[in-house]
Image (cartoon, rainbow, N blue to C red):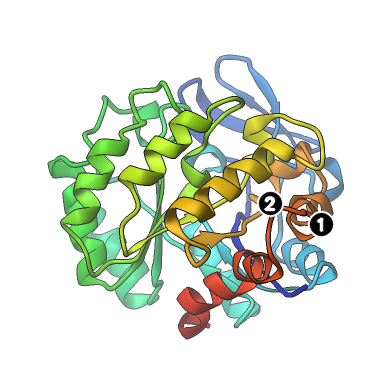
Amino acid sequence: MKKIDAHTHLIEQICGIGSEGELRPLGNGKAIYASGKVIQLIPEEYGDKSLTPETLYSTLRQHDVEYTICLQGNYTGFQNLYTYEASQKYKGFIIPAGTYDPFFRNKDKIISHLFDTLGIKVIKMEVSNGSGLMANHPTVDLDGDVMNEVYTMAKDHHLIFYIDIGRPGNNCYQVDALANAIKKYPKMTWIVCHLTAPQHDQMAVLEDNLHKLNLPNVYFDIASLPNNTKQPYPFYEAQAYIRKAIDIVGKDKILWGSDFPNAMNYTSYENAYMYIENSEIFTMEEKENILYHNANRLFRKLR
């Protein structure tokens, strides 16, 4: 079955920052925060201290992925220029997303270079308090002045806007504020990462979120859904969450993504899509939409 991976990452060098300080590489895909916490960021088979465009391309092509949207993640360190360079090497296969910290003093120069000079057409903002904007800044109102300035910039540059609001129960998880903000920018295309990141046994949370965010210009990627629910393959709880999402927001609003490479520490790349392909609770049309058609409608003009 044809696929578009709507949520991947590249890592030239691990240089992230999060709530536990700076993140530096240890080798074999491992990294250490300033707090001393060690994590497996990249599966060993995919990289030592980096995740290269060549590895991304070869891995995804082995699984019949037609192209991918390559996002930024604070936990790896911003990889804007590396991702853009990769998109030029693999034109039509890698669609780059850019990002920046809205507290950067010279952010206007960054915006101009990324979205004017380089012409990047996708922005990814991670605002989580683990490894996003609120990990090293005070709590930011997702419908406040700081973020509305980002949204206005994205509107003026005609950008597709990905946003990762972290996990339920944290101060970054502001579904109501996000919904209010989205309503102010009805002509923008928004993609909420990780289907709002419901964890195990949070169907009620997900259902409430989906009703609030069921707006004409809002889509949802389902990257890392198996990881967040922490159930074994074939990830029945993740399937149930996707089924609920289709029932509430429709079959045209869900985008498959793998969250490669980090999510592959939990499951294989193959299983990250086979749980949908082999599911008995989705129609063939729904599967094809999730895995390919929905993303292609949004991104084919950017290739």
The percent position of residue 138, horizontal first and vertical second, equals: 26, 24
Residue 118's place in the image compared with 36, above or below, is below
**How many numbered marks are there?**
2
Q: Is residue 255 left or right of residue 128?
A: right
> Which residue does the image show at 51% across and 49% down from the upper left?
245
Task: Identify the element where label 1 is drawn.
Answer: loop
Q: Residue furthest left?
A: 145
User: Would you say residue 99 is visible in this rendering?
Assistant: yes
Q: Quadrant of residue 85?
A: bottom right
The alpha-carbon separation of the residues under discs 2 and 1 comes to 21 Å
Give residue 260's mark: 2
> Which residue does the image show at 33% across and 48% down from the upper left?
213
Foreground: disc 2 or disc 1: 1
Which is nearer the eye, 4 or 17?
4
Residue on which disc 1 sits: 278
Q: Is residue 127 left or right of residue 280?
A: left
Q: Say which amino acid is labelled 1.
A: Asn
Q: Quadrant of residue 186?
A: bottom left
Q: Say which amino acid is labelled 2.
A: Phe
